[in-house]
Image: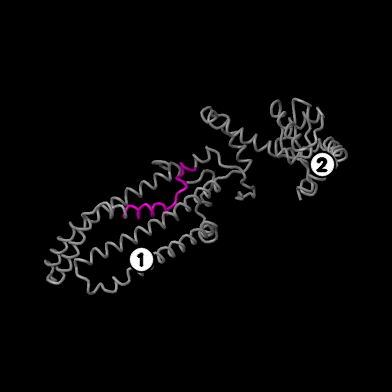
Amino acid sequence: MAETPEGQERTEPPTPKRLEEAQLRGQFPKSPELTAAAGLLGSVLALLLLAPIAQVLQELLRELLRSLATVQLTDSGVVQLVLWILPKAALVLLPLLGALLLLGVAAELVQTGGLRFATKKFPQGLPLQTVFNPLLGLRRLFFSTTAAVQLGKSLLKIALFAGIAAQVLWAHRSELLQLAVFPVQQLAPLLWSITLELTLKLAVAFGLLSVGDLLYQRYRYREELRMTRQELKDELKQTEGDPQVKSRLRSLMQQRLRRWMLQRVRHADVVVTNPTHVAVALQYVPGRMRAPIVVAKGAGYIAEQIRRLAQRWNVPIVQNPPLAQSLYRSVEVDQEIPERLFAAVAEVLAYVYRVYRQDVLRRLIQRR
């Protein structure tokens, strides 16, 4: 699990606001392998669909071999040969380059969800000495999970290319060994066929690799943008004053906080109630916690949900209106109770340990 420099675990998924800010900084889950695979696929499609290229290439190769035997190696002769080759080579290469460019751009647009422009240069809230720290840069470059994954991908690509090239060349070894005696008119089709087969197999292999890499990049992207509980709470407080953002995000974040809070009721040792209007769930693990903490609290409908979940998970429910009101008003979720409430909470916990001994023992065993 990712951690902040302060050691807090990033346990919460990124909010839409955090994702939007990352995209404004130009951060997208992109796979370079997908762009490379799209380029190879473009080459294959161009070779397959543009049949006149094969004829032009064959004629160009034939004329080039003939010209090399007769051309005079003078300045004018070389210039004349180059001027003759360039237009014909452009006719062959431009469709291929165009296909590569179009599919490369399409692959980028698919990964970013359209044409996006970064409007923020650096992560907000980070000092420049952190952004430009060379030691941190070297650490990320050589001693990180990302560096290990990049190394693994590079080795895998080298192995794929070497293996596929060796397989194609071995399959055509008899023809390649006879290149010296092949007629010129048969040489171009042979090289064309081998090139097409090699490119097609590489496109398929790199396409499969790019799918896995894209899934991994999307996973890493969301993992790196995960938030601590405090960051989630701070963002909710910041957006409460913005009417436009509030209408879009407040409901979603409140639901997420509420869902996370209610899930923690099952780990509570006791739920203190009002008895119907307020409910506060407390947890205390001796040896791990300095004082009991509030894992969930709510009024009205939320209090009813807390009581219902406590009944489902066999968490003791104790009616103590003054204590419930004090806890609800003075203690936030995931915070320790204040010292002035120690005695009252200790009495409740002692009562729970005495009356619900079996449930308490079972819960302690589960925690271990």
As drawn, which residue projects farthest toward the right? 354
Residue 168: mark: 1
At a point 55% along the width and 39% down the height, the residue shown is 15
Q: Residues within 10 Å of mark 1 (few under 14, many from 20)?
A: some
- Indicate how the structure is coloured in the image: one colour
- The kind of residue on which mark 2 rests is Asp
Image position, residue 352 (x, y; %): 84, 38
Which corner quadrant of the image does residue 65 belong to? bottom left
At a point 70% along the width and 30% down the height, the residue shown is 305
Q: Which portion, as a residue range, is magenta? A: 22-43
**Along the line of sight, the residue nearer the viewer: 41 or 70:** 41
- The kind of residue on which mark 1 rests is Val
Q: Main secondary structure of the magenta part?
A: helix
Above-or-below relation of 322 to 204: above
Q: Which residue is the site of mark 2? A: 359
Asked whether residue 24 is drawn in magenta, I would say yes
Is tag 2's residue or tag 1's residue first in the polypeptide sequence? 1
